[in-house]
Amino acid sequence: MNLSFDTDLIYGYKSKSQIVRRMTENWVLNNSYCPNCGDFPLIEFENNRPVADFYCKYCSEEFELKSKKGKLSTRVSDGAYKTMIERINSENNPNFFFLTYTKNWTVDNFLIVPKQFFTPEIILKRPPLPATAKRAGWVGCNIDISKVAEAGKVFLVKNSQIINPNEVHQSFQKTLFLRSKNEAAKGWILEVMNCVDSIKKDTFTLDDIYKFEHELKSKYPNNNYIKDKIRQQLQLLRDKGLIEFNGRGIYKKISNGKI
Ligand SMILES: [Zn+2]
């Protein structure tokens, strides 16, 4: 994997956004493998197909690319709000690649948020375009990455360092089980994943996570067994290799993409 963009591609394009689009897409084509199966290279969809930008010819996973200069921010702008929500609800949204690059045209971060982590909660509605705009009234959306659980941010490149592809593959595989869960079951797992992420320690106790009981109760007011639900999700996360039990009520996080 070469972290530099092919800057020869600048020639022939006038608009900055076209140049960036061309260079980042070209970089993905020449450098990215499929995080699901490892196949290389990815294939580009024909232009103007709204489905996604790339797919894997071996396992058929689809990927959309979003890129941004500078720091990895928590919000990334995307297309129409309504379309995005419809795609999430009908489960035909692609996986998202997020790429950040430096002023020297090199890749700083390149990560994938697998599609099973996309829920309506992480899609924020933007204000409608003003009456003076060409597309007056159009409503776009932002993707709020800060609401995505850590297990749903699989880095291929982190802070300009390339992550071992085997580790990327394992991290990607670990959460595929979420795709077979119904919305309610997945909702609980993602909630507890976020609670675990909010604990700022690598090891934690059951009491640490029970502190989120109130918060979860406000989201599930009809559930009177919140602690049981929490323990059930922790058990599942343990079985799937996302956390470890160290005995006597001590749990340990397992992180992705450690450098
Ligand atoms: Zn693949």
Image: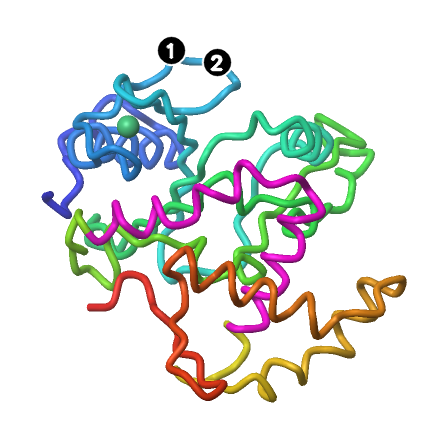
Residue indicated by mark 2? 49
What residue is at 34 percent from the left and 27 percent from the top?
Answer: 14
Residue 99 visible in the snapshot: no
Q: 10 Å neighbourhood of mark 1: few (<14), some, or many (≥20)?
A: few
Residue range (magenta): 167-196
Ligand 1 has an atom within 8 Å of the beta carbon of the residue at disc 2: no
| Residue 214 seen by the camera | yes
Residue at 28%, 39% (x, y): give it. 35
The quarter of the picture where residue 82 lies is top right
Relative side of 95 to 164, left or right? right
Provide residue 31's location: percent of width, then percent of height. 16, 36
Q: Is 58 or 7 nearer to us in this picture? A: 58
Q: Is residue 169 magenta?
A: yes
Magenta segment includes 189: yes
The spot of residue 227 in percent (x, y) is 70, 75
| In the image: residue 21, left or right of residue 81 | left
Question: Label 2 sits on what residue type?
Answer: Arg
Per the rendering, the mark at residue 106 is none
In the depicted structure, whether residue 232 falls above or below residue 52: below
**Ligand 1, what quadrant?**
top left
Element type at mark 1: loop
The quarter holding residue 8 reads top left
The secondary structure that most of the magenta stretch takes on is: helix
Residues at circles 2 and 1 in contact by the CB criterion of under 8 Å: yes
- Residue closest to the eye, 108 or 20: 108
Q: Can you identify the residue that label 1 sits on?
A: 46
208 versus 20 height, above or below:
below
Q: Position of residue 6 (x, y in %)?
A: 14, 35
